[in-house]
Image (spheres, rainbow, N blue to C red):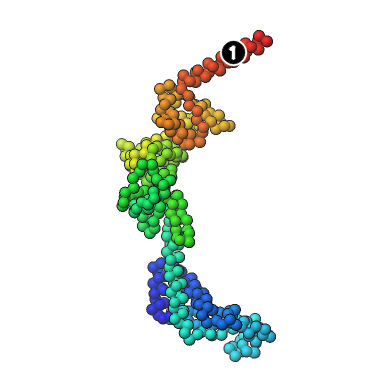
């Protein structure tokens, strides 16, 4: 060990953000192991050993440690009070005596061991730095570049680390071209033995929420709240918004002047349709709004079962249900209510059938 080595360690400490004390202590622990492996005999392998490294010069000393006792039973770990006085007259029973046992050829072994420890610490520090940086971005949005595709997975460059966009997190029909910039939602950050692992998504509803926060200052500032989101990625999203300021129109703020704000989000999501609806405390009103763009005639809710019966004009039924049931399905997810939709004609027919059945029952009872 020499001055150059110490200076190199300090440079690593500055660049990698490693604790200097922790690095030196780890090196000293490694040197203890190196000494026991290469120099300790079978008889004294159980000896307590301490290694010190001078923080300024790099000079190394190895000490065997013995406990001062009245009567020595184990020579390797114990020393008599009388013998301890040869090292210092201050020693008392129970004190630890450090006896230098530095081998003459220990320098080469020490340098090799220290190098291995430093390399290992650098790798650990870099992994921790990356993890600590990304854990603060969990459940947030990030921009990355497409590097390559392999077996359906898309590998994304996030700067200091790669992330994998799995097949389940990709938007249906979306193409991913080399070097293309993408906005992604970080769904998970894990610290593993191989380093930080970043889980990203293009399908998560959180991506839509974060995009609105980026595009709409009122959402970012908390004036407009996003109460709920339901999404079928690549096709359609419903988002319920509410204004905490009566002077601010929540839907208008999200749409933006000439629709520019919502259009920017639609463009980022490759023309995914976005329905912005007004959230309401009143369940009937909220459900009615959620079925937009269909116009609702009436909503009857059943609080206990969390279900709602909705009536629309005959010509609005297909619009309310949506293609393959998508509109009502998204509305149900958005509101948290089970929704049963009927046209005016269907509702009237059910009422007539019910009345007819009731009349027949009454007629039968009367005859009996």
Q: What percent of the width, then of the height, locates residue 354? A: 56, 18
Which residue is found at the position 42% from the left and 49% from the top? Answer: 166
Residue 116 location, quadrant: bottom left
Residue 323 makes an appearance in the image = yes
Location of the N terminus (image quadrant): bottom left
- The residue that mark 1 highlights is 359
Question: In front here: 77 or 296?
Answer: 77
Q: Does residue 40 lie above or below 21 as drawn?
A: below
Q: What percent of the width, then of the height, locates residue 159? A: 36, 57
Question: In front here: 316 or 244?
Answer: 316
Q: Does residue 265 lie above or below 131 as drawn?
A: above
Q: Residue furthest front?
A: 151
Q: Is residue 117 left or right of residue 44?
A: left
Question: How many marks on residues?
Answer: 1
- Secondary structure under badge 1? helix
Q: Does residue 314 lie above or below 127 as drawn?
A: above
Q: Does residue 190 lie above or below 88 as drawn?
A: above
Q: Is residue 216 left or right of residue 26?
A: left
Which residue is found at the position 53% from the left and 31% from the top? Answer: 307
Location of the C terminus (image quadrant): top right
């Amino acid at each position: 060990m020499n001055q150059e080595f110490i200076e190199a360690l300090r440079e690593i400490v500055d660049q990698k953000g490693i604790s200097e004390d922790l690095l030196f202590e780890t090196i000293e622990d490694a040197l203890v192991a190196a000494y026991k492996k290469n120099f300790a005999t079978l008889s004294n392998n159980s000896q307590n050993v301490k290694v010190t490294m001078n923080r300024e010069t790099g000079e190394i000393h190895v000490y065997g440690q013995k406990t001062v006792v009245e009567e020595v039973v184990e020579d390797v770990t114990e020393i008599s009070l009388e013998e301890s006085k040869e090292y210092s007259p201050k020693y008392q029973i129970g004190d630890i005596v450090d006896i230098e046992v530095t081998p003459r050829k220990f320098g080469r072994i020490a340098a090799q061991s220290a190098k291995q420890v430093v390399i290992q610490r650098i790798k650990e520090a870099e992994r921790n730095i990356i993890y600590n940086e990304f854990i603060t971005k969990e459940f947030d949005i990030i921009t990355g570049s497409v590097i390559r595709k392999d077996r359906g997975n898309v590998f994304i460059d996030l700067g200091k680390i790669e992330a994998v966009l799995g097949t389940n997190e990709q938007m249906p029909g979306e193409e991913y071209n080399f070097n293309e910039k993408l906005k992604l939602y970080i769904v998970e950050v894990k610290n593993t033995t191989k380093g930080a692992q970043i889980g990203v998504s293009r399908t998560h509803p959180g991506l839509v929420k974060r995009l609105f926060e980026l595009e709409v200052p009122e959402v970012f500032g908390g004036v407009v709240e996003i109460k709920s989101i339901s999404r079928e990625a690549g096709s359609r999203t419903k988002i319920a918004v509410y204004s905490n300021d009566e002077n601010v129109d929540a839907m208008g703020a999200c749409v933006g002047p000439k629709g520019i704000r919502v259009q920017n989000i639609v463009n980022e999501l490759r023309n995914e349709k976005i329905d912005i609806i007004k959230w309401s405390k009143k369940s009937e009103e909220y459900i009615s709004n959620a079925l937009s763009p269909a116009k609702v005639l009436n909503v009857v809710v059943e609080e206990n079962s969390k279900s709602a019966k909705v009536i629309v004009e005959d010509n609005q039924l297909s619009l309310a249900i949506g293609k393959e049931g998508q509109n009502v399905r998204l509305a149900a997810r958005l509101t948290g209510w089970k929704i049963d939709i009927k046209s005016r004609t269907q509702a009237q027919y059910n009422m007539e059938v019910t009345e007819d059945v009731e009349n027949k029952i009454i007629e039968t009872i009367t005859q009996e």
